[in-house]
Amino acid sequence: MNREELIKKWLDNDLSTEEQKAFEQLEDYNDLIQLNSALKSFKAPEFSIDNRYNDLKSKLETHRQKPNQWFKPLLKVAAVLAICFSVYYYTTGLDTEINTQIAQKTHIALPDASTVNLNANSIVTFNKRDWDDNRNVFLKGEAFFKVAKGEKFDVITDNGTVTVLGTQFNVKQRNNYFEVTCYEGLVAVTHNEKTQKLRPGESFRIIDGKPFATEKEIATQPSWLRGESSFKSVPLLYVITELENQYDISLSVDKVDTSRLFTGTFTHKNLDLALQSVTIPLNLSYSKSGTSIVLKRE
């Protein structure tokens, strides 16, 4: 089989074992590999085998017509640079995703000096390359934001979007629970195509699709930053979910009315104390077996 047929079959990924060995013995085998890599970096996903072969052939013919091959090192450098440029462009265009595990929290610095404190079992996603044009953060879970002044800043969740220019606020989005609290500046919350503005101390809360009234917040930051979870008239179901987020446990509540409202606080540093803080006010008890805990009525 001649050289041109081998190259065509190689481009078509159709070489047999013997043909592959013959192809690898070609004098310009390494050049073929490098040129093909460079072409791949700049080609669109849809391509023609014949066109790629013609591109390679024209370059290789020029290469063979110059016996001194003085440009061979330049060709290798160009191929390497093409690959590096493509990898850099691809990787910098990817979204940055940061997540926390159960009982884990983290602090994140965004590209414009805005910051995010991410609560346990939560995810934030943003794009560094597009940040100057779109300050968008996608959130699943709970986070406290300190936003640097600048263009519009959006926190996008499955339940609604929070829009600000420069402020401090907390967003909690877990399943059917969506709550936004403003601590500084002005916050606009959009839910089901309706927008509500929040001033410092004001909150917006939707649970199971229904709005819940909230009291004015006097604290300057959410309690979970101090190692506590606080609730005001929140269904027990969501208090239990937060317990599971802060401790590596599984709570069984089959015999408990989880729609009862709970007002109170539990610590993130002592499991027994946290359980007592939730069960005693509701006249409940609990039993533990490893990481499994059963809540019971007294």
Image (spheres, rainbow, N blue to C red):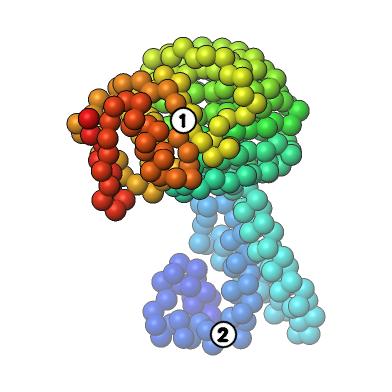
Q: Is residue 29 above or below residue 267?
A: below
- x and y percentages locating residue 240 in the rendered image: 35, 34
Q: Nearer the viewer, residue 164 or 193?
A: 164
Classed neighbour count for the residue bearing mark 2: other residues with Cα under 10 Å, few (<14), some (14–19), many (≥20): some
Classed neighbour count for the residue bearing mark 1: other residues with Cα under 10 Å, few (<14), some (14–19), many (≥20): some
Does residue 193 appear in the picture of this structure?
no
- Which residue lies under the disc numbered 1? 265
User: At 49% from the left edge and 23% from the top edge, which residue is drawn?
Assistant: 179
User: At 31% from the left edge and 44% from the top edge, which residue is drawn?
Assistant: 250
- x and y percentages locating residue 22 in the rendered image: 48, 86
Q: Nearer the viewer, mark 1 or mark 2?
A: 1
- x and y percentages locating residue 75 in the rendered image: 73, 72
Q: Is residue 118 above or below residue 92?
A: above
- Which residue lies under the disc numbered 2? 26
Q: Is residue 282 above or below residue 73?
A: above
User: At 71% from the left edge and 74% from the top edge, which residue is drawn?
Assistant: 76
SS at circle 2: loop
Label 2 is placed on what type of residue? Leu
Q: Nearer the viewer, residue 56 or 201?
A: 201
Upstream in sequence: badge 1 or badge 2? 2
Does residue 177 appear in the picture of this structure?
yes
Q: Is residue 45 above or below residue 154?
A: below
Q: Quadrant of the C terminus?
A: top left
Q: Nearer the viewer, residue 20 or 182?
A: 182
Label 1 is placed on what type of residue? Thr
User: At 58% from the left edge and 37% from the top edge, which residue is drawn?
Assistant: 225
- x and y percentages locating residue 279 in the rendered image: 33, 32
In the figure, is residue 70 to the left or right of 35?
right
Residue extending farthest left: 255
